[in-house]
Image: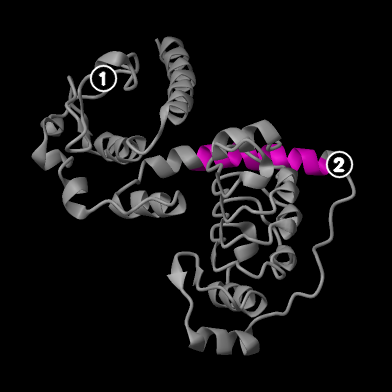
Amino acid sequence: MRLSRAAVLARAKAVALEGVRRLNCWGSHLTDISICRDLPNVEVITFSLNGISDLEPLNQCQNLSELYLRKNNIASLNELFYLKNLPRLKVLWLSENPCCGSDPHRYRMTVLRNLPSLQKLDNQAVTEEELSQALVDGEEITAPPARRSMEGSCSASTESSAAESTMETESELLSFGLEETNKIREQLGMKPVPKDKFSSFSPQETDCSRKTRIRVGACPFSPFMWSHWREDSCSVELPFSLQEPENNVLNAILLLTKELDTEGLEIVQETVGRRLQVLRKRELQEE
């Protein structure tokens, strides 16, 4: 999927591309980010959980200081060639891409050798010792990656990566906890959730400890559900109970939902509606 000008302006709440400072397209099934060539003043970009494979458009983002690319389809570390001339880049999250390979040390050393100005890589602070070691163990990248010549192959690859990204997004939700929630909040530029607020919605301290499954037909974004929202505790007084794994998922979702504006909530509502339709069809087929 191509990231369009309209989508950028809507996400960034800007009237012109030159005015975009922060862009969050987490989990948006993106494969084409060519529009980034027209974002000279963007400072923070969140592209995690997409199907992006080409970083060349980011070469024009000279004011970029933070870049989040976790779980995409970046196949080669040679893509770092396009980031080497970004003078303000201090934070990069590139983990869980094919380019990371099976040798974590070699991967980290290669990234730091080519991007020595980084202060944080994959949510881990960069040390002076690592920068020195990277000169020895890291591989210097001097040329961009070779591109496939067959458009059909590229198209099939991007479609496959987008589908895999969708599956990974759903599976990730099953293991959300405080750590994962705060990682996502950090990518979105939000403050971390204190342990006391997160635990206040735990099964041991709420009515959600009773073992009753959510029915698919009960949409968590209906007006009735929103009427049970408690701003002071960042939780919902649910009219039904959840099993513990489901409670963890809802926990993370609700903590993030509070940060969304009207537009963001509408997007969530549409997504939930589509998901409910799929689950309802599945239930009917099983019956």
Q: Earlier in the sequence, mark 1 or mark 2?
A: 2
Q: Disc 2 residue type?
A: Glu
- Residue drawn at the location 17% of the way across and 19% of the way down: 239
Q: How does the figure colour the protein chain or chains? A: one colour
Left or right, residue 178 beside residue 186 = left
Mark 1 element type: helix
Which secondary structure dominates the residues rendered in magenta? Answer: helix
Characterize the local packing of mark 1: few (<14), some (14-19) or many (20 or more) Cα atoms within 10 angstroms: some
Q: Residue furthest right?
A: 149
Left or right, residue 184 beside residue 139 = left
Classify 193 as above or below 237: below
**Percent from the top left, x then y, of residue 59?**
74, 60
76 magenta-colored: no
- Which residues are drawn in magenta? 153-168
- Residue drawn at the location 36% of the way across and 41% of the way down: 174
Characterize the local packing of mark 2: few (<14), some (14-19) or many (20 or more) Cα atoms within 10 angstroms: few
What number is the disc on residue 225?
1
Mark 2 sits on what residue? 151
What number is the disc on residue 216?
none
- Determine contact: label 1, label 2, CB under 8 Å: no
**Percent from the top left, x then y, of residue 219?**
34, 18
154 magenta-colored: yes
- Residue drawn at the location 73% of the way across and 43% of the way down: 35
Q: Nearer the viewer, residue 93 or 276?
A: 93
Q: Disc 1 residue type?
A: Met
Which mark's residue is nearer the viewer, 1 or 2? 1
Mark 2 element type: helix
Give the alpha-carbon distance from disc 1 to disc 2, as whole Å: 47 Å
Q: Nearer the viewer, residue 117 or 253?
A: 117
- The part of the image, by quadrant, that contains residue 108 is bottom right
**Percent from the top left, x then y, of residue 23?**
56, 46
Classify 278 as above or below 257: above
